[in-house]
Amino acid sequence: MRNIYVLGSLNSDLAISTDKFPVEGETVNGQGFKVGCGGKGLNQAIAAAKLGGKVKFCGKIGNDQFGKDMKKWLRVNKVNVCHVKKVSDASSGVAIIVLNNNNNRIVLDLGANLKISVKDVDAFLAKARKGDIFVSQLENNIPAICYALKIAKEKGMVTVLNPAPANIEIKQALNFVDYLIPNETEYEILKEYISKDTNLIITKGADGYEYRSKGVSFSELAPKVKVVDTTGAGDCFVGAFAYMLASEKPVNKETLDQVTKIASISTTRFGSSISSPTMEEVNKF
């Protein structure tokens, strides 16, 4: 089993359900308010760890209860948090999530997530080995992510980037990415910057995924499940894919169908990181 290094975000999820999304100037009633631990980086790290991956995390939190809770949640899920550091000049990241049926709207304050430095990256990847897996997203400061992808590639790591939320500033580092995993919206924003030689996996929600790589392409629908909350499903997909890479599984249709199944299971539960299944739960599905 290869090690999985996740450089990413930690955001406290403040979620509430409503029968309709409010329009400008409107107040609507909600229900089921919950506070959870999320952020794309945290979600992906925990998804991989719950499946059995050996995961190390690099991120920044504020000097607040949200940060303490997120660091503790990573530990509970057996993620190495030696490189989760506290800053004094920013609050921990927060995501305001409004749920309506099977859809969501999210507003982010990234806060401490934007404080990752080159020194943080160097310390984090100092002991990484050739063949280890590096995973990142775009909820941290882009220069640090670009630098980390470059260093990871130079070390011979397998690099995975989930370009979410889409930001064209990442175009300068796309050549350092082995597997790019956008959703359909992110792909449309970034497609003119993506090389034809890139291993591309486009996630499509209920429509599953599409894989493209050097003239090879295939796709599959997601299995039909009773969806209760799609929050974090894309992150579960990325985490599960990283776990498969770390397990040295071939990147083929069978593997990606399994990854899609794992992400689909997460949509049958409320929450983001807490909804990711264990391998035992996947085998029973």
Image (cartoon, rainbow, N blue to C red):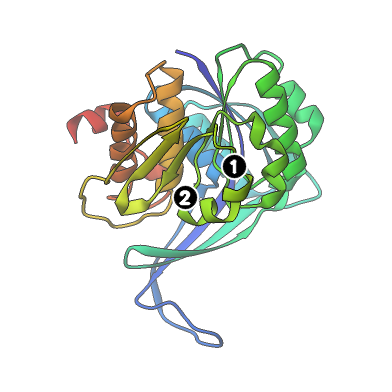
- Rendered residue at 75%/32% (across/down): 147
- Give amino acid for label 1: Ile
Decide if residue 60 is on the left or right side of residue 3.
Answer: right
**Which image quarter: residue 202?**
top left
The residue closer to the viewer here, 258 or 221, is: 221
Location of mark 1 (residue):
194
Decide if residue 259 is on the left or right side of residue 88.
Answer: left
- Give amino acid for label 2: Asn
User: What numbered label is drawn on residue 183?
Assistant: 2
Q: Tell me if I can see residue 248 in this picture.
A: yes
Q: Residue 247's x, y, as percent? A: 41, 17
Comparing labels 1 and 2, the label whose residue is closer to the camera: 1
Mark 1 or mark 2: whose residue is earlier in sequence: 2
Q: Residue 58's x, y, as percent? A: 65, 31
**Which image quarter: residue 252?**
top left
Decide if residue 58 is on the left or right side of residue 52.
Answer: right
SS label for mark 1: loop
Q: How many marks?
A: 2
Q: Residue 13's x, y, as percent? A: 51, 55
